[in-house]
Amino acid sequence: MTPRAEVLIVGAGPVGLTLALALAQQDIPVRIIDKEASFSGESKAVTLQPRALELYKLLGVTDRLLRAGVANRTMNMHVGTRRVTVLRYDRLASDYPFYLHLHQGQTERELVRVLEDRGIRVERATALEGFRQDKDGVTARLVRAGGPDEDVRVAYLVGCDGGHSRVRSGLNLAFTGSRHDDHWIMTDVRIPNMSLARDERHGFILERFPFVVLNLGQGYYRLISARMPDSPHKGQVPTLEEFREIMTPLGLGHWRLEDPLWLTHYRPSQRLVSHFRVGRVFVAGDAAHVNTPIAAQGLNTGAVDALNLAWKLGLAVRGKAREALLDSYHAERHAAAVSMFAENDRLTTLVFGANPVLRYLARKQLHLLNLPPLNLKNVLATSQLGVHYRHSPVVHKAPARSVFQHDTARPGDRAPHFVMDAERRTPLYDILRADRHTLLVLGGERPDLPAMRALGAHARKRYGEELRLHFVFAGRTDPTLEDEGLGKVWSDPHQGAHQALGARGAGGVLIRPDAHIAARFPLGAPDGLDTYFRAILN
């Protein structure tokens, strides 16, 4: 007999697997099904961005992914054959200042291995036929290929089942947007005589379409292009010869293209669901939003969906979450998708713009990216490191300007990258956990030990099951806090941690399980901590 689950996940792609893993880390009983009998074998999404790698770090997966993939720290941007700028991912403030390339199938396999280590197996060849929900739970009808059908009762159901989502359809949700006129072609192919730098990305902006080269490792490269509106090949599967025709004017016609893993074509869409949550049913990933591939946002946005939802569902399953917390999943992720779509539209105008004057000006703007601040702003926009929830209904927005700078690490922002200890060199993301909050008690230049102890004791007494405590001293540390079991003690003699968090003095910074700032407050005023938890907990 299959053990009872509290959450049923429909779809075992990267998003569903990520959600299952994040729930398993919280010891939430989960089942994950997929209608396909096995992996598709198609490489599909191949880019993991810095933010996704930070979040997978919280799940213990990133090191596995790094071993399987190829890190690219720069992208050479050409207009025609002339390189005009280099996009510098290696300047991003992250433990992972690069884009990681690996086949989606490799990502899925690594996630499955970790999930199986935790006792959860994907139920394959199992489809969702339908579901109904009431105030107490969801009843789902599962259909197995060659096996008995089953009615499953769970507390919550999450559709991670792609652009043609059965879950979204069952909720009768609007999925609005448009299909672009661009016709994309793609291949993953072996190139034994690659003549471009192999550890860098390469983009060529041509008259009305791009040509992109990404290193996938083991001698394989992804080639991405698009067809002109009047192309005679519209609607046809591309051939290697079609790619050679595109490459030859770029001086790349001598490349040997061998053993393609796949050749595909499609017209990209941008569509967004009207609601990410209806009662006890949620949608995530492509079931909630599909977008053009122009900035490799799809899989990465879905992974962020999963981490945003997982900790909220975990609290709900344990009977601790207010409805406002579950509602915040839609509020936060819908707004993030709208921003992502706007950035994709900007890039689409740059690459595909039909107006020749605007197209000329857009290509001229590429030269401005040679200025380091503009270069950094551009790569930040597509790395997802800049995604924030400042307007979320569940982050604590009360000003604490006497202690914290207004524009640094604001509530709702991504937790910044910094080193916790000058000697041990421990990055912040090494101590964050996806199964609970993290409270950093900052001592400032002149630590008030009784006040730090009082805040720690208050937090542990009221919210001990929901958070981990860390004490950060700018001056001399006091190990008695650690000896007393209040929390871990860290030394910050150069105040790198204080500066990264925008702290002018002593205070508390609460970080959510999805590595976003939840609240910050002066050391002697824990009301900010209490106000935040009152808003999300019963």
Image (cartoon, rainbow, N blue to C red):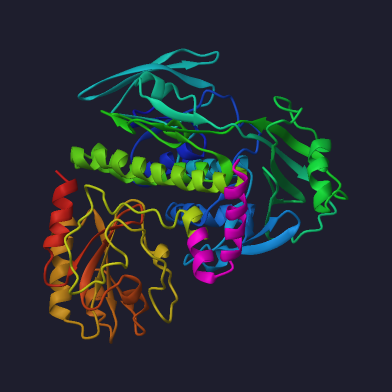
Q: Quadrant of the C terminus?
A: top left
For the point 50% across and 45% down, which residue is it?
A: 344
Residue 490 vertical placement versus 228 (above, below): below
Residue 138 vertical placement versus 67 (above, below): above
Q: Choose top left, top right, bottom left or bottom right for residue 133.
A: top left
Q: Position of residue 431 (x, y in %)?
A: 38, 64
Give the number of marks: 0
Query: Can residue 73 be seen?
Result: no
Q: Is residue 298 left or right of residue 257?
A: left
Residue numbers of the magenta segment: 354-378
Q: Choose top left, top right, bottom left or bottom right for residue 263.
A: top right
Q: Is 371 within the magenta?
A: yes
Q: Position of residue 320 (x, y in %)?
A: 19, 42
Q: Is residue 365 left or right of residue 304?
A: right
Q: Is 444 within the magenta?
A: no
For the point 54% across and 39% down, which residue is it?
A: 292
